[in-house]
Image (tube, rainbow, N blue to C red):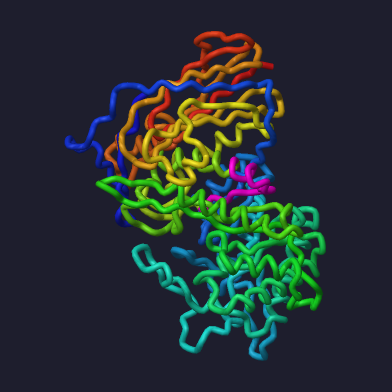
Amino acid sequence: MTAITAIVLAGSPVAARQVATDPAAPAAPTAARDVTVTVDARKPIGALPPVWRFFGADEPNYATMKDGRKLLLELGKLREGAVYFRAHNLLNTGDGTPAFKWGSTNVYTEDRDGNPVYDWTTVDRIIDTYLARGVRPYLQIGFMPEAMTTAPAGTPYQHSWRPGFGYNFIISGWAYPPKSFDKWRELVYQWTRHNIERYGRAEVERWYFEVWNEPNGAYWEAPREDFFKLHDYAIDGVRRALPTARVGGPDTAGAGGEFMDAFLKHVSSGTNYATGQTGTPTDFLAFHAKGQPEFVDGHVRMGIATHLREVDRGFVKATSIPALSNKPVVIGESDPEGCAACPGPENAYRNGTMYSSYTAASFARIWELAARRRVNLDGVLSWAFEFENQPWFAGYRQLSTNGVDLPVLNVFRLFAKMGPERIAATSSAQVALDTIVKDGVREQADIGTLATRTPDGRIAVLLWHYHDDDVPGPIARVRLDIAGTKAGAATLWRVDGDHGNAFAAWQRMGSPQSPNDKQYKQLEAASIMHEESVAATGSTRGGRSFTVALPRQGVALLVIDGR
């Protein structure tokens, strides 16, 4: 194994470059860092809910395209029937042609007399594709159909945003309230009723329903009370068709500030705009949290502290009103930064192991924060999918490129191998929770661990070697002392510069933008993690010891069958 030495630059939406091969680039330190991880399988310390099983994208129509279908199949395999997908733009007017930060289904138009005309063809195809691959909808009710929008005259309905444009350029006619809230409610009612007829009540009861996206920001071009009205009418439409539907929101940008405070008060004790009753049915609460990477001294520096502080603020808000404090919480977007399709050198972490190691380190802390705040954490949604027919390794925040998986997807595969019961585990080099939330990982690397017991009794130990700065660093020589297990087979899966990493393989073959069939197969093969048999390197009282070499920005999972 070797340390990761590549630094990726993606200043524009074209293939990322490897710059650390420059002779002037610093070499990775050769001295290994010794780390001790101690696991005690005899000490359960609580549940570890599978919160990682949520994904999403701006562009809903990618789901039905070649590479989108392939990726959804891989997501469904993570935990069939328990993986959820959230997409923007499901109610937009248009012909279904995808574009950056755009999609459409044409579900709602009106005849010449202003009567509704419903067409479920395209949205059915999207949901059919999810379900056929073991994925269920986290159904976002939005955005505003063209025939309904109150956008000022002359406002374009569809935007023409492209990478490099200002983010607010996406705001156009779809972002406004409806001309008729009754028609809006009826659209949602008819859609829900249609879904029940097509997929069955028991299936639709397992979905999540929420209204809009980040209504406290640019996505909503109206006062917040108008959003509360939009939300109430939509939820009333859903519940009229399916009284047992799982409904919630509001999927704010960040923890939501005063907007979230007002929303929580409205749904718990305010007057419902649609029914006149007190409160609005709320089965789960949702907010977003993002990090803030930057480009410093020729390399990417991640902003994990910014991300985790926003998570913590969201947890505090979610538990601020007693009537709602035990509701399930979904972080409806949780990512290293806020724009999956935006280029820039600060976003050059995406193709390689910076993204995968960040994912392991951040999820571990989100679980910790939820336990500290006593939050009923149900989901942490990664806003990452794929961008169809784009250059190879173009630097977007995605899980695959042209049908080839990126290293980050393998970390979710590792999560899927873990169990629901957390057991005691410590690392001599793990950065303390309060430190990483306050300062990130700017000094010594964070070499951490999380251990679980699987339903069949195996012990699964996750290891990561993370640093905010994408620069070379020493390998960690990790000694794992595992107590409370019997002798049995041990297996290891790894994601680093040499394992489960198609990006590194693509760079080694010269970064081709048109790989031939042989190269494509090689890239697919390089993306796959391989199970490795691991022998114990020693024994401890009541257990065994193992040694794992873990490169900077590497992630590994050791599974011990000590039943």
**Residue depicted at x 31% and y 44%:** 8
The residue lying toward the viewer, choosing from 254 and 330, is 254
Q: Residue 103, percent across and down?
A: 52, 66
**Residue depicted at x 59% and y 22%:** 39
Q: Residue 375, percent across and down?
A: 67, 48
Image quarter in which the N terminus is found: top left
**Residue lying furthest bottom in this view?**
113
Image quarter in which the C terminus is found: top right
Q: Residue 378, percent across and down?
A: 67, 48
* Quadrant housing residue 120: bottom right
Q: For this view, does 365 lie left or right of residue 370?
A: left
Q: For this view, does 405 lie left or right of residue 274?
A: left
Specify the segment rendered in magenta: 368-383
Q: Residue 478, percent across and down?
A: 46, 21
Q: For this view, does 28 lie left or right of residue 148?
A: left
* Quadrant housing residue 179: bottom right
Magenta highlight on residue 378: yes
| On screen, residue 180 above or below 106 | below
**Residue depicted at x 59% and y 53%:** 331
* Quadrant housing residue 265: bottom right
Query: Is residue 324 visible in the rendered structure shown here?
Result: yes
